[in-house]
Image (cartoon, helix red, strand yellow):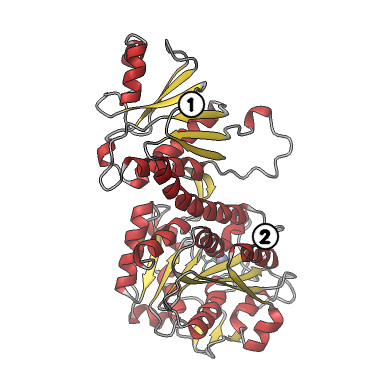
């Protein structure tokens, strides 16, 4: 979708203008009402429309305006955050799109500056929300009804400072572009997205300055990735480890590492999952999808930060070659792992990826994202991702970033008592707890054994990567949860 900023509203068949929560009109709406002898106010008074944030009223004809007018509720605009502005933009997009409009001019230039945001910046955030919402996954629908095909293709935003709006928007569009890529790979079916094709997506990022290195099974075998390779050994798809580097900081900053679980399909393996809902396991690579989208957005906005992004990619299949419950593997760290459940595979690929990353890059912080446990949705539902960490400061930075962008995190405890639960009778560690609850925590304890003192955080995004209900910013389906959060985390704390 094309988004344009201009300092003067061009003639258009559709104009969007503002109304505030107390029912008062923005100056653009006021002028239109005056020119129409008060008929705009009269129409509003005859409806339920009240100017609450995200509410809309369509007036098909207004005297003196040759086209339709959509009044957009901006609510209590002075107290809005950037996130509320983005949600308003997203709702506006969804509304215009459902009205089958092709193009609209949006004049909200009378919005009062919000808290720390000048007007030009507010308008950029509204535009960003529309852009985020404009993504949809419909590439496989070849026989759609005409009225199903999205038609909205251009939004023109009036701004008192076009240059400033454009500058802010370019950064936000880079972030939206990254999360659109994440949403794409997460939505693609597992016959299209598998370890090697994920590696191919990563290679595409070379064009924008990301360094990309790929380890195949042969290389990983030589290095000793016994835990990761064990997960993929039942699949005809070759497992991959993809290492991406964006070194945008010129002052020798120690890198921050981001590692993603990338199970391109999780059948459970020999401990096979029930068929009901197994199709959901196509998004078990969402952690890696976030790493991919994050690297894209950092490069697109030329972030002044050094980031290593690692994708741990494998397909978890049952077959004659698959690993068995009770197998013992030797991980890259040298620690032996007793596999007691082949469906607890995410922690196995992460064990080797985390060890490799801390050993090779000595990051100042290491963060992993994984659709790791169903148990996290028992604890937190679909509202927060679980946060587990050995470092309070890192937790604070991540939690605050998540709150700002609407990708919230809730910290859960870790400790010795839980750690005991992953001791194995036959090996150094076992890949499941003893079944006495706290499944998401024992999974995190398992991971901690492979991070070797590095300040580290684990984000369990199993409940956040995909939405069956409609979300204001991202609609239904893949959410891209994590891309906006980590961009904010870097921008706020590391890009000075
Ligand atoms: N990929 C699943 C977790 C998951 C569940 C992600 C639902 C997204 C939605 C993970 O590999 C898994 O199977 N975990 C098991 C762990 C158990 C065997 C200890 C689970 O949660 O049941
Ligand atoms: Mn599993
Ligand atoms: Zn899994």
Judged from the image, the secondary structure of the residue bearing numbered disc 2 is loop
Residue at image position (61%, 32%) is: 151
User: Can you say which quadrant of the picture contains the N terminus?
Assistant: top right
Q: Which mark is residue 193?
A: 2
Identity of the residue drawn at 36% across and 33% down:
109
Q: Quadrant of residue 397?
A: bottom left
Residue appearing at x 44%, y 69% in the figure:
305
Q: Residues within 10 Å of mark 1 (few under 14, many from 20)?
A: few
CA–CA distance between discs 1 and 2?
44 Å
Q: Nearer the viewer, mark 1 or mark 2?
A: 1
User: What residue is disc 1 on?
Assistant: 10
In the image, residue 490 above or below residue 36: below
Name the element at disc 1: loop
- Work out whether residue 492 can be spotted: yes
Along the line of sight, the residue nearer the viewer: 336 or 141: 141
Please count the marks in the image: 2
């Amino acid at each position: 979708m094309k988004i344009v900023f201009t300092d003067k509203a061009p003639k258009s068949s559709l104009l969007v203008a503002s109304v505030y929560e107390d029912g008062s009109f923005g100056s653009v709406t006021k002028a239109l009402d005056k020119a129409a002898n008060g008929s705009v106010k009269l129409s509003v008074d005859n409806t339920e429309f009240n100017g609450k944030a995200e509410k809309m009223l369509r007036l098909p004809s207004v005297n003196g305006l040759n086209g339709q007018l959509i009044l957009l509720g901006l609510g209590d605009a002075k107290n809005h955050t950037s996130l509320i502005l983005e949600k308003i933009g997203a709702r506006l997009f969804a509304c215009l799109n459902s009205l089958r409009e092709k193009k609209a001019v949006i004049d909200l230039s009378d919005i009062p500056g919000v808290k720390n945001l000048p007007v030009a910046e507010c308008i950029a955030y509204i535009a960003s929300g529309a852009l985020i919402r404009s993504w949809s996954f419909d590439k496989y629908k070849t026989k759609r009804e005409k009225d199903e095909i999205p038609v909205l293709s251009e939004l023109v935003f009036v701004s008192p400072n076009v240059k400033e709006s454009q500058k802010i928007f370019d950064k936000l569009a880079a972030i939206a572009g990254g999360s659109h890529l994440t949403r794409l790979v997460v939505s693609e079916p597992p016959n299209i997205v598998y370890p090697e094709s994920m590696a191919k997506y990563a290679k595409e990022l070379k064009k924008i300055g990301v360094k990309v290195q790929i380890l195949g099974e042969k290389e990983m075998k030589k290095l000793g990735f016994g835990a990761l390779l064990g997960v993929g050994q039942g699949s005809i798809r070759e497992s991959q480890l993809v290492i991406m580097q964006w070194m945008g900081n010129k002052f020798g900053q120690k890198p921050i590492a981001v590692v993603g679980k990338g199970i391109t399909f999780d059948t459970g393996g020999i401990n096979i999952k029930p068929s009901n809902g197994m199709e959901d396991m196509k998004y078990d690579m969402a952690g890696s999808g976030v790493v991919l989208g994050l690297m894209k957005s950092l490069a697109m906005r030329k972030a002044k930060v050094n980031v290593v992004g690692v994708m741990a990619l494998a397909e978890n299949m049952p077959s004659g070659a698959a690993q068995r419950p009770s197998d013992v593997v030797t991980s890259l760290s040298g620690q032996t792992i007793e596999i007691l459940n082949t469906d607890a595979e995410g922690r196995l690929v992460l064990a080797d990826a985390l060890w490799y990353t801390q050993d090779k890059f000595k990051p100042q912080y290491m963060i992993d994202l994984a659709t790791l446990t169903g148990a996290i949705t028992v604890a937190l539902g679909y509202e927060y991702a679980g946060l587990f960490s050995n470092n309070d400061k890192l937790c604070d930075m991540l939690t605050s970033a998540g709150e700002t962008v609407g990708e919230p995190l809730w910290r859960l405890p870790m400790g010795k008592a839980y750690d005991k639960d992953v001791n194995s009778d036959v090996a150094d560690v076992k890949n499941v707890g003893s079944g006495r609850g706290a499944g998401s925590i024992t999974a995190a304890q398992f991971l901690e054994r492979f991070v070797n003192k590095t300040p580290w955080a684990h984000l369990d995004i199993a409940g956040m990567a995909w939405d069956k209900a409609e979300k204001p910013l991202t609609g239904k389906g893949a959410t891209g949860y994590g891309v906006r959060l980590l961009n904010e985390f870097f921008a706020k704390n590391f890009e000075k």
